[in-house]
Image: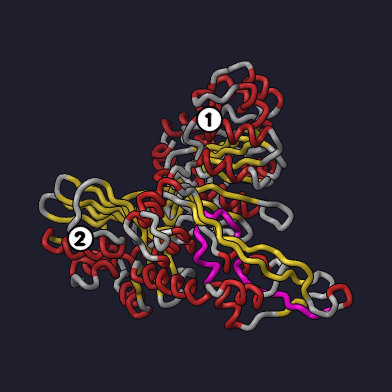
């Protein structure tokens, strides 16, 4: 258009989309032959497909095990091809593309931006059709000639992503590991490290200690480095204020921020790259989510480590009581309806849902997730991420993805009326919906959804089960036994006294409990790892009637407990008597 004399300021507002297309010959379905592609071909195809944006909402094959080639038979007159098929490229004029047109951006710059916005090129469309066996790779290369350009974009994106990672060698990991005989020795290492190594040692020690979050907080006279371990923040070290700019600069560089920019809230992500697996760390790449906020004494940094090595996506290893686990698996396996996990941030809801999806995942069902962000990759599951800034919300994603007719959908969180109603209607029309909600207990989820605008009769029909959960620290094996006080015994008897006979739970003798002691294995903390305390409210006919009548949360809860539900507090107290955790831990979270 520009070469024809059309001004850019006329193109941008008047054109909705450009469509490019080619025709390629279709392989004859009667004689086409499968073959295993050469490694060079397979690598090239994987590179080209890997730059398809998640916004394209396509399930990209992870491996290229086979392709197809022409042979020739009577039905295709010995040619190997019969008929033709189109391959397409649709360039939608988004705000980003409009801006580039007005700025007279080049063809490659516009193409790369369109790819980031979700465009699929003709070559990519052709490759996907070749993988399906509709055409051959030679036909795609002949018709498009885009492969060199797309591989250039791949190399460019790879170099950008590699610059957003911090590399930690085996030697660095070993050095930090050897320096961690105690928390005091770790403190000395971090406080004595030079500016070049401080960030590296912080990340290495965080991985070794299985840290969830790293908090770096400037105060009046020093900067505190705190790790969240087993859900509890602990101060690990303090560094002088004059050393903080260098550490902050390293984190900003990794996050893609300018070191000169200050103020507001800055969110990003980068990755930690290990030379090889180390000790219990099986993954060599760990994603880090970063948030930087300007506080009273400077910029505060919070980094969340999404370490797949530390997450056992095995529902039987989450510490859920047998009686509750059986209910969870039974209700989640139902072909339609809603299964909700509830609790505050950091209570393990997402891990429980991922573990449930792993149980449900098989080649016969289609599972789609909508997350914010995608925390852990699941093979065989189409995972998508919301982007509120671009209008791709949970509700928008749900509407779009339901057209794919999934058997099971996992929604990261129900946050608003629109998402809640779409999820409930999807459940009522034959889909299985798994999601999370922020409420204090299982019964409270009903009122929360009604407050969001969901009709009580729809809710009663759609919901299969509601689970509330918390994470408590597990006692290390160095724990010590003690007798309970009279007040503790009396309190325990009140809490456990109304456990229904229908719960299937045997209450241990209320005599003794255990306390944390501390040893080398638990870094002298007394606790090591976490376990789940939970309650699972199954919506049977009687509960359904209560919900439909608009009964209060207390009435629904009482009925569920009468029918055999174990409350979170009861589950926690049982774990105290069983020696898994302490009274203080249960009282802290319930």
Rounded to the nearest angstrom, the CA distance separating label 1 from label 2 is 44 Å
Give the image location of residue 435, x and y in percent.
56, 41
Question: Which of the labelled discs sits on residue 259, or is there none?
Answer: 2
- Crowd band around label 2 with a 10 angstrom C-alpha radius: few (<14), some (14–19), many (20+): some
The reply, left or right, for residue 311 in relation to residue 339 is left
Segment colored magenta = 48-72
Please check the rendered image and state whether residue 66 is part of the magenta-colored stretch, yes or no: yes
Please state which of residues 271 and 546 is positioned toward the viewer in this rendering.
271
Residue at 54% x, 21% y is: 554
As displayed, is residue 313 above or below residue 195?
above
Q: Residue furthest right?
A: 74
Please state which of residues 321 and 351 is positioned toward the viewer in this rendering.
351
Please state which of residues 58 and 301 is positioned toward the viewer in this rendering.
58
As displayed, is residue 456 above or below residue 279?
above
Image quadrant occupied by the N terminus: bottom left
**Circle 1 is placed at which residue position?**
445
């Amino acid at each position: 258009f520009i070469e024809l004399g059309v001004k850019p300021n006329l193109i941008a507002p008047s054109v909705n989309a450009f469509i490019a297309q080619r025709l390629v010959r279709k392989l004859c379905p009667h004689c086409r032959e499968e073959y295993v592609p050469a490694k060079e071909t397979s690598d090239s195809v994987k590179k080209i497909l890997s730059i398809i944006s998640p916004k394209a909402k396509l399930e990209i094959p992870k491996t290229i095990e086979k392709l197809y080639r022409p042979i020739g038979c009577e039905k295709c007159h010995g040619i190997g091809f019969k008929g033709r098929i189109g391959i397409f490229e649709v360039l939608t004029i988004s705000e980003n593309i409009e801006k580039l047109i007005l700025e007279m951006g080049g063809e490659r710059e516009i193409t790369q931006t369109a790819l980031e916005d979700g465009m699929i090129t003709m070559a990519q469309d052709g490759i996907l059709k070749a993988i399906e066996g509709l055409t051959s790779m030679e036909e795609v290369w002949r018709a498009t000639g885009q492969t060199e350009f797309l591989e250039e974009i791949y190399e460019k994106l790879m170099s950008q992503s590699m610059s957003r990672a911090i590399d930690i060698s085996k030697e660095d990991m070993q050095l930090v590991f050897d320096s961690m005989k105690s928390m005091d020795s770790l403190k000395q290492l971090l406080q004595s490290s030079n500016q070049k190594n401080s960030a590296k040692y912080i990340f290495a020690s965080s991985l070794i200690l299985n840290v969830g979050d790293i908090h770096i907080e400037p105060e009046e006279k020093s900067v505190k480095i705190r790790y969240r371990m087993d859900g509890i923040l602990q101060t690990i070290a303090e560094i002088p204020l004059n050393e903080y700019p260098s550490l902050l600069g390293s984190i900003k560089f990794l996050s893609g921020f300018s070191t000169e920019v200050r103020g507001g809230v800055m969110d990003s992500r980068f990755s930690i790259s290990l030379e090889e697996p180390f000790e219990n760390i099986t993954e060599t790449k760990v994603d880090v989510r970063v948030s930087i906020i300007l506080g009273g004494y400077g910029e505060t940094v919070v980094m969340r480590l999404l370490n797949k090595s530390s997450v056992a996506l095995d529902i039987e290893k989450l510490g859920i009581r047998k009686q509750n686990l059986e209910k969870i698996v039974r209700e989640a396996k139902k072909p339609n309806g809603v299964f909700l996990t509830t609790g505050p941030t950091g209570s393990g809801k997402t891990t429980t849902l991922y573990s449930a999806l792993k149980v449900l995942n098989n080649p016969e069902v289609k599972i789609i997730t909508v997350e914010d962000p995608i925390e852990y990759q699941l093979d065989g599951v189409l995972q998508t991420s919301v982007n509120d800034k671009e209008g791709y919300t949970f509700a928008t994603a749900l509407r779009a993805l339901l057209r794919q007719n999934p058997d099971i959908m996992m929604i990261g969180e129900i946050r608003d009326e629109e998402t809640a109603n779409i999820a409930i209607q999807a459940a009522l029309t034959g889909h299985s919906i798994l999601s999370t909600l922020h409420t204090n207990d299982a019964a409270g989820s009903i009122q929360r959804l009604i407050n969001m605008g969901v009709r009580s009769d729809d809710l009663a029909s759609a919901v299969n089960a509601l689970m509330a959960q918390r994470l408590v620290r597990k006692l290390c094996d160095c724990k010590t036994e003690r007798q309970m006080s009279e007040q503790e015994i009396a309190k325990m008897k009140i809490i456990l006294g109304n456990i229904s006979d229908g719960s299937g739970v045997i209450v241990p003798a209320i005599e003794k409990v255990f306390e944390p002691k501390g040893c080398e294995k638990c870094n002298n903390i007394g606790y090591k790892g976490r376990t789940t305390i939970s309650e699972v409210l199954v919506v049977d006919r009687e509960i359904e009637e209560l919900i439909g009548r608009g009964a209060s949360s207390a009435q629904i809860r009482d009925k569920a407990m009468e029918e055999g539900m174990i409350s979170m507090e009861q589950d926690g107290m049982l774990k105290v008597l069983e020696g898994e955790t302490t009274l203080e831990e249960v009282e802290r979270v319930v």
